[in-house]
């Protein structure tokens, strides 16, 4: 045995400490660390309890942003005097009695931890009265003393000096204004879900917010502003035992921050990655850059199909069938965004129809033109010869004729916007949401007239969306074509990347990628999408593998679609009509009609608007008419 060198010290022996049960107070304080992060956490838990008690009016009173004092008063059923001492004990609750009830929780609170945890880090008192009690009772949680008190039927919970017993935790709290903002947001989340309950927030004796009982739509307007309701559309979608309701904001009303995003499961506000990902994917074709959509969405699902007992704060959930939820949420919002009625164009349709007497209303174009072909097929023929096997070029539509020659130095003729020598009906301003074409401005914009005034269309952005939607429909019919590499590109991979490449070989093939292991830590890219001949194979492979790894198996199909869509969006951008391309009046009208028949035609593939309305009132104001 080799002796230790003189200057090498032997490791100190760590004294073994015996295993012991923790004191109840310390156990509660540890639980409080999970349940109570800041005053807003206390507000959320107490409001949960008030709603479970059947309250129709809840008042929250705060001092110093809730750090010094939080009082939540409700007019619910109250707590019987003999049950008050149990209310502050750990895991004591009236909400569940068995595992079966736990697996189908339908109440906001159920864990029996909140009051005990809050009482361990604050001075807590409960004043409550039931309808059959002669007076209220007040319980001091620290001393256990119970004494008569005065108040109406309902419950008041007082929480003072939060974290007084754990000063280190108190140091992590922010300013009073910040804590007040968080507490207000906690109440706002409840208010959006329960319009049948009135809420009031007081701070330092001053009324901060008040929301009276109202309808769902009125409550959204009261909480988020009337602009949210005006710039959003109702969502109502049923998928088996699940319903998705609420309102989804229009892309044009997107925000710089995700501060107007509220998702609920069975009335409970949640932050769920699956739901958030589904919502983001529904907006991905219509949002520009890092803009954030606004929405208030309620998912109603059988309680046994969702686990709300995932985290002590109850803000996270786990779905039994995550794929079904993902698909239902995405389709519900996509349907609203794709529908013409959920866009400014739809509002133009409604406004035109409302402005015309019923006897004078001109018919809109038929769903099927005289030949029986889909209207879009009659109005447009996409030029897809450069897209290889992705799309088979259609035969010329009966009404389409060659377009006029382009300007000198412009792009090739736009032969996929059809014009009609024999249109089915005269084109009048009141016939179409986007009106009739008047002229082209600076080789970039199409000017048109409708019943409301002037329409300005970005012709490249509009045509880009039309081409993109056609390409997507075609690509859904077959996998993307792959281009084999003469020399495979190899790279050092993590074990996770190798595992994903092996497990998701079929998904990769659908994207035109062939990635196979060469060893335990090496992958080879043998083929890449033919539509991306200049893409770096290794960078592309790593990106796709990373996204596949982040998604659950049920979501992989959507990831494939999204990756395809990104490729097709690039192709559509290059295939759309370019600036300085001169269009005839017939071609401009063809573009307008095709926009009206295309889903999501209000935004290009990058989320930019494709058209804008300038009303006659706005034009009159510019020229001071009527003054």
Image (cartoon, helix red, strand yellow):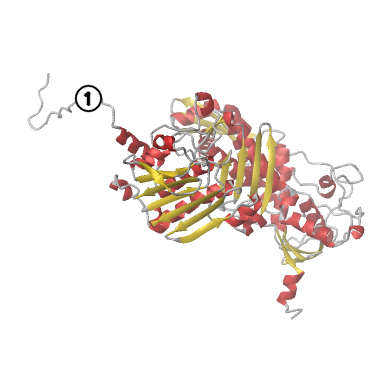
Q: Please, what secondary structure does the residue beneath circle 1 have?
A: loop
Please state which of residues 154 and 618 is positioned toward the viewer in this rendering: 154
Residue at the far front: name it: 134
Relative to residue 605, is residue 417 drawn left or right?
right
**Residue 176 location, quadrant:** bottom left
**Residue 484 location, quadrant:** top right
Residue at the far left: name it: 6
Identify whether 448 is placed above or below 495.
below
Q: Name the residue under label 1.
A: 18
Measuring 44% from the left and 58% from the top, which residue is drawn there? 203
Mark 1 burial class by Cα count in 10 Å: few <14, some 14-19, many 20+: few
How far across and down, in percent of the image, does residue 270 sit? 53, 41
Q: Is residue 404 visible?
A: no
How far across and down, in percent of the image, does residue 517 sit? 50, 26
Relative to residue 605, is residue 536 drawn left or right?
left
How far across and down, in percent of the image, does residue 89 sit? 38, 34
Q: Can residue 282 be seen in this view?
A: yes
**The N terminus: image quadrant:** top left
Identify whether 164 is placed above or below 392.
below
Please state which of residues 145 and 516 is positioned toward the viewer in this rendering: 145
């Amino acid at each position: 045995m080799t002796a230790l060198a003189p200057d090498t010290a032997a490791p100190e022996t760590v004294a073994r400490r015996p295993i012991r049960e923790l004191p109840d107070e310390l156990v509660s304080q540890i639980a409080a660390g999970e349940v109570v992060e800041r005053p807003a956490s206390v507000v959320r838990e107490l409001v949960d309890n008030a709603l479970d008690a059947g309250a129709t009016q809840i008042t929250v009173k705060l001092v110093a942003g809730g750090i010094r004092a939080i009082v939540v008063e409700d007019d619910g059923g109250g707590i019987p005097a003999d049950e008050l001492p149990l209310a502050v004990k750990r895991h004591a609750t009236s909400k569940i009695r068995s595992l079966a009830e736990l697996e189908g929780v339908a109440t906001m609170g159920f864990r029996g931890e909140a009051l005990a945890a809050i009482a361990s880090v604050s001075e807590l008192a409960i004043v409550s009265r039931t309808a059959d009690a002669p007076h209220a009772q007040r319980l001091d949680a620290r001393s256990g003393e119970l004494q008569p008190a005065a108040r109406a039927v309902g419950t008041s919970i007082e929480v003072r000096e939060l974290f007084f017993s754990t000063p280190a935790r108190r140091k992590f709290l922010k300013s009073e204004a910040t804590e007040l903002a968080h507490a207000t947001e906690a109440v706002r989340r409840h208010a959006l879900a329960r319009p049948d309950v009135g809420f009031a927030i007081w701070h330092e004796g001053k009324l901060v917010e008040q929301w009276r009982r109202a309808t769902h739509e009125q409550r959204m307007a009261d909480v988020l502003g009337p602009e949210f309701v005006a710039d959003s559309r109702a969502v109502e979608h049923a998928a088996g035992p699940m319903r998705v309701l609420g309102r989804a904001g229009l892309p044009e009303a997107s925000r710089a921050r995700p501060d107007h995003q509220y998702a609920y499961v069975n009335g409970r506000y949640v932050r769920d990655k699956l739901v958030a990902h589904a919502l983001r994917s529904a907006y991905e074709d219509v949002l520009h850059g890092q803009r954030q959509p606004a929405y208030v969405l309620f998912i109603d699902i059988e309680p046994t199909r969702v686990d709300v007992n995932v985290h002590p704060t109850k803000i996270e959930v786990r779905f039994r069938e995550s794929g079904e939820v993902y698909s239902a949420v995405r389709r519900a919002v996509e349907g609203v965004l794709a529908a013409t009625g959920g866009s400014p164009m739809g509002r133009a349709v409604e406004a035109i129809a409302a402005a015309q007497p019923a006897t004078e209303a001109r018919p809109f174009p038929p769903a099927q033109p005289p030949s029986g072909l889909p209207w879009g097929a009659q109005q447009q023929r996409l030029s897809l010869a450069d897209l290889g096997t992705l799309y088979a070029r259609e035969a010329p539509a009966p009404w389409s004729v060659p377009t006029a020659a382009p300007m000198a130095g412009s792009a090739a003729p736009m032969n996929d916007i059809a014009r009609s020598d024999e249109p089915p009906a005269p084109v009048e301003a009141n016939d179409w949401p986007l009106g009739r074409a008047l002229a082209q401005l600076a080789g970039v914009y199409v000017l048109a007239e409708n019943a409301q005034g002037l329409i300005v269309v970005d012709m490249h952005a509009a045509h880009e969306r039309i081409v993109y939607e056609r390409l997507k429909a075609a690509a859904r019919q077959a996998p993307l074509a792959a281009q084999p590499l003469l020399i495979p590109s190899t790279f050092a991979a993590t074990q996770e990347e190798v595992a994903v490449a092996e497990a998701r070989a079929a998904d990769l093939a659908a994207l035109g990628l062939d990635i196979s292991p060469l060893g335990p830590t090496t992958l080879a890219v043998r083929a890449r999408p033919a539509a991306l001949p200049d893409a770096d194979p290794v960078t592309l492979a790593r990106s796709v593998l990373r996204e596949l790894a982040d998604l659950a198996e049920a979501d992989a199909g959507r990831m494939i679609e999204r990756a395809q869509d990104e490729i097709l969006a690039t192709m559509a951008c290059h295939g759309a009509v370019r600036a300085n391309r001169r269009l005839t009046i017939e071609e401009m009208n063809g573009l307008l009609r095709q926009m009206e028949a295309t889903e999501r035609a209000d935004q290009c593939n990058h989320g930019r608007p494709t058209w804008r309305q300038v009303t006659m009132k706005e034009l009159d104001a510019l020229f001071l008419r009527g003054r």
